[in-house]
Amino acid sequence: MEKNIPYKTYLEESEMPKQWYNVRADMKNKPAPLLNPGTHQPMTAEELSGVFCEELVKQELDNDTAYIDIPQEILDFYKMYRPSPLVRAYCLEKVLDTPAKIYYKFEGNNTSGSHKLNSAIAQAYYAKKQGLKGVTTETGAGQWGTALSMACAYLGLDCKVFMVKVSYEQKPFRREVMRTYGASVTPSPSETTEVGRKILAAHPGTTGSLGCAISEAVEVATHTEGYRYVLGSVLNQVLLHQSIIGLESKAAFDKLGVKPDIIIGCAGGGSNLGGLISPFMGQKLRGEADYRIIAVEPASCPSFTRGKYAYDFCDTGMVCPLAKMYTLGSGFIPSANHAGGLRYHGMSSTLSQLYDDKLMEAVSVEQTAVFEAAQKFARIEGILPAPESSHAIRVAIDEALKCKETGEEKTILFGLTGTGYFDMVAYQKFNDGEMTDYIPTDEELQKSFAGLPVID
Ligand SMILES: *Cc1c(COP(=O)(O)O)cnc(C)c1O
């Protein structure tokens, strides 16, 4: 063990970032704008403000301001569970017998169990400040719904969550955590919305998808006085809030006098990865430093590695604006045996542009390999990782093993986005040897691409 690098590096409260960093400000090619699904014209602030809070609309559309002040109330909330530690994985390095130096930024140290609280508190704060009564949202695996429930409880806002039906049934305890924080939780698709009834009529017995739940949550927000819709990933504003992860990581590395060579994160909608890489990508875009940046996605839902870069619907009900992104098509629903989260059909438009500009790489991994890495990590480093996070662990281990072959002493940083206590059905499958891999065929993807909207 090197003497000068501690297992855990925390920032002092006074060293915590006081501004978020907006990577779009340094991008030459800006992410493509959201389009009105009817007119195919860029969404105006006025149009967006029917769906989102005004301050969040501003952040969504702001491609120019590099640093945005974090309001004091949010900083105070952050202080309850931040800074999160930057951990040197000495034990993992030793077991892998690698010359690589592995670090992870651990975001699981709060009740919601993931990084999602970083944006939940920001979005709830702006809703409250606007004088709204409440917010609606969707949740898949449940982390976002939990985080938002916590934030709303803290600020005294009502919170209506549409939870993908299969998760609602598989994760009853997630649901109860949300209800404990005062949220109402409805399994989606439901009979409570017009779009839910339409989806149920077309696909009786469907276990739901994030795309369906988004449509329902947006419908309720836009039809209920004093409510707006909030989203836990994908949007530019969410990446902005999540930049706190990268800013803290960078500050901790600077304190240690260390520079990572490879930065790895799992990618669902892209918020944790976008947040983790933001300040590093900023340096890369400004030509100040170079990093290898790797997005990791499930082979069963491979938006970056097999998707198309095109305008698409963000939701199944096609009520949301169109976003240009790497997408599998809004009708794409990952195989039912896919256990590891990260099941959204699209990807953040900011990350999509960065990927298209070859400023970052992407790999896909199969879920049995992901759970092998998760198990190994739990046994060696002690933390029981979320399946989503374990995608990043898998590739961090693979990169460290490559270093073993080449003898290179690379410094690897990965995002450990959360804990997996509510994912024990998936772990059980893996432990029982019943987990299988499913990779969609080209034919299936072609079928799904056929549903992409035509934009001229
Ligand atoms: C939601 C979630 C993810 C994936 O979402 P992104 O927006 O891509 O970050 C990853 N890990 C955990 C623990 C999550 O809850």
Image (cartoon, rainbow, N blue to C red):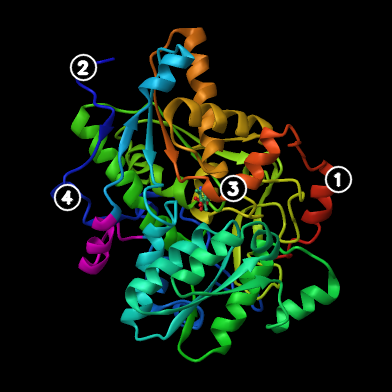
Above/below status of 390 relative to 337: above
Disc nearest the viewer among 2 and 3: 3
Left or right: 446 in relation to 277 = right
Q: Nearer the viewer, residue 363 or 119?
A: 119
Label 2 sits on residue:
3
Distance between mark 4 and mark 2 Cα atoms? 24 Å
Magenta highlight range: 64-80
In the image, 137 versus 44, the foreground residue is 137
**Secondary structure under badge 1?**
helix
Identify the amino acid type marked 2: Lys
Q: Can you tell which mark lies on residue 13?
A: 4
* Amino acid type, residue under disc 4 in the picture: Glu
Foreground: disc 1 or disc 2: 2
Q: Residue 423 carries which label?
A: 3
Is 225 placed left or right of 215 in the picture? left
Q: Is tag 4's residue or tag 2's residue first in the polypeptide sequence? A: 2
What x and y, as percent, mark residue 186?
Answer: 62, 74
Residue at 69% in and 68% down? 212
Quadrant housing residue 217? bottom right
Q: In which quarter of the image is the C terminus?
A: bottom right
Q: What element carries label 3?
A: helix
- 278 or 3, which lies in front? 3
Q: What residue type is labelled 1?
A: Glu
Which of the marked residues, 1 or 2, is nearer the chain's N terminus? Answer: 2
Mark 4, secondary structure of its residue: helix
Disc number placed over residue 443 in the picture, else none: 1
Residue 269, image x, y percentages: 55, 53
Q: Where in the figure is residue 299, as x and y percent of width and height?
A: 69, 39
Q: How crowded is mark 3: few (under 14 residues within 10 Å), some or many (20 or more)?
A: many
Q: Is residue 65 magenta?
A: yes
User: Which residue ends up furthest to the left in the rendered image?
Assistant: 14
